[in-house]
Amino acid sequence: MIASDIIAYAWQSLSRHRGRSLLMLIAMGISVASVMLLTALGEGARRYVHDEFASLGTNLIIVLPGRNETTGAGLNAMPGVTPRDLTLDDARALARHSAITRIAPLNVGAVEASWQNRKREITLLGSTHDLLKLRHWKLAAGQFLPDMEWERTTPVCVIGKKIRDEIFGPHAALGQWLRLGQNRYRVIGIMASEGRTIGLDVEETVIIPVASAQSLLNTPSLFRILIETSSRGAMPSVIEFATAVIRERHYGEEDVTVITQDAVLQTFDRILSTLTYAVGGIAAISLVVAGILIMNVMLVAVSQRTAEIGLLKALGASRQQILRLILTEAMLMSLVGATAGFVIGIFGSWGIRLAFPELQVYPPFWAILTSLLVALVTGLLFSLLPAGKAAGLDPVRALQGR
Amino acid sequence: MIRLEQIHRDFEVGDQIVHALNDINLDIAHGEYLSVMGPSGSGKSTLLNIIGILDHATSGRYFLNEQNVTDMDELAESRARNRHIGFVFQSFHLVPRLTAAQNIELPLVLAGIAPALRRQKVQQVLESLSLADRAHHTPDQLSGGQRQRVAIARATITEPSVLLADEPTGNLDQKSGSEVIVTLEALNQRGITLIVVTHDKNIADRSLRSLQMVDGRVVSDRHGR
């Protein structure tokens, strides 16, 4: 029997029994579509989190004061010792490393901002010129903090969009003097509103040079030191360097914590990937259910067509030919169903993207490939039993419809 | 061309053994016209099934065209059925979703013959059985006689050496029945070996050789009309 005849014969028998075929098609289609949609959603969530972290800055190392572990309070340890402060000198000592491209010391505090008769509680950030690029922020107008000596106090500030709107209202903000605590600062830049950011709301902050912030908040201590390295590969050596330098400067006391946003990101990545695999796996169970449905429908089809199979045998069809005919029928059905599911999956994820534009819902390539393959393989596996049953029929009894 | 030697066929029914065929010895020459008569359960259909290689003898030997069928494997058996044997059934056994022409070409499709050659052969057979205008009708659009003629066309499309007909007129009225018999006899005259199982004494009387079977044995073998 030539291949085109096998396919034509199987197709004819499928199109003759529309209800039955439609049932199998829907089962297969829904399974493939659900695998694709669920993994697309998981993948979209993973990408969303990934992008969120990327917006914090790339290859970012954060040095914060204090140690997140309990050390022994033995006889030699002085009880009640607080960790040594992180200072600007610490930050400068770190900047020596060649793999560090940007470094930004950071001070944070809450102060009252006022202009004319408007007042507002704001988050004050004290930092340096590098912060803008290190955090991937953008300016809406004006300029960022000038590139200058860290110790210099210069009365300039960069304000967030919400501060601009609420304090200055319709007036031009650039060039105005904004009062922060006891001092006045000239507004030299306005931050663009950030699409998304974790932790800090840029719209409600005012940024001034780090030395000015230290004097305004009356503290020599830094809140964080943010470090950007030239590459991901350089990160471990920079971490080691930073820990060693601070330990040395703090008389052998390892009283800072060095974290990377990578570590956090990788954890999220792992969780979400696992979740994607899990929901994909759960959806794949529906493929197996579809396979069982195909098996049942094909078993019924075989017993309904017993006489026809007997006839084919009488006309000279071998056991193998019958097997091939029934398998082809099931495979065709799985193929059409899987294709329909693929189309539904593609359009479905497109629909989700329309509804939630911030989620990048694309079915991952591996999920498409796997679901199509699994669909065909289950179609084949579950039709082996009915096909085998048909092939093994005794022609004399089959012709009598028994 | 057909030789049966000491053929036995036993069936197990419950815990009893039924001897459907009991020591059958038979020689059928090329081009013979043979009828098989006998009461229900006398084993005539079983005999036909064994000659058609649909069923296997419990013991004994069967030669078809000098080939020992009893030694064949499943694939060789199905090939032999396809090439050497044509079946005509009482209930026609046409595939309802296929047209007359598609039903007729089925054995050629199974044999893997190219579509162009198939069309040509089907056209010839349709014309010789005056079914040309029914080629694209499905079985439910055909009369009983036409259905059986389509079945005969299907049985002869591979130009087999033996045509086995099991009660070919059993589901037909008098007129269509005799048309079918005339068709079968015409094929026999062109050289095909024709074996007809029948209850109808008129048909048996027309055949050149007639077997009488009772309880799985051949009780009479009449040559000549």
Image (cartoon, rainbow, N blue to C red):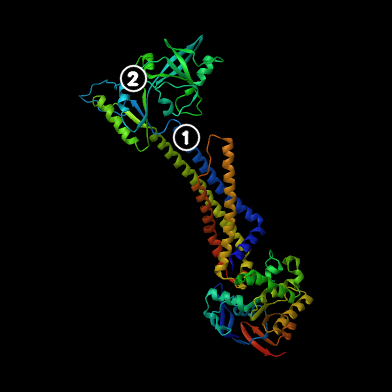
Kindly identify the amino acid type of the residue bearing the numbered disc 1.
Asp
Is residue A27 in sight in this rendering? no
Kindly identify the amino acid type of the residue bearing the numbered disc 2.
Ser
Residue A360 on image: x %, y %: 52, 38
Question: Is label 2 in a helix, a strand or a loop?
Answer: loop
Residue A221, disc:
2
Q: In the depicted view, which residue is nearer to us: B191 or A353?
A: A353
Q: Quadrant of residue B109?
A: bottom right
Q: In the depicted view, which residue is nearer to us: B173 or B32?
A: B32
Residue A262 on image: x %, y %: 39, 35
Q: Does mark 2 fall on the same chain as mark 1?
A: yes
How packed mark 1 is, by other alpha carbons closer than 10 Å (few <14, some 14-19, many 20 or more), is some
The image shows residue B62, relative to residue A256, as above or below, that is below
Question: Is label 1 in a helix, a strand or a loop?
Answer: helix
Q: In the depicted view, which residue is nearer to us: A295 or A400?
A: A295
Cα gap from disc 1 to disc 2, whole angstroms: 31 Å
The image shows residue A299, relative to residue A139, as above or below, that is below
Circle 1 residue: A51
How packed mark 2 is, by other alpha carbons closer than 10 Å (few <14, some 14-19, many 20 or more), is some
Q: Quadrant of residue B81?
A: bottom right
Q: Is residue A229 left or right of residue A322?
A: left
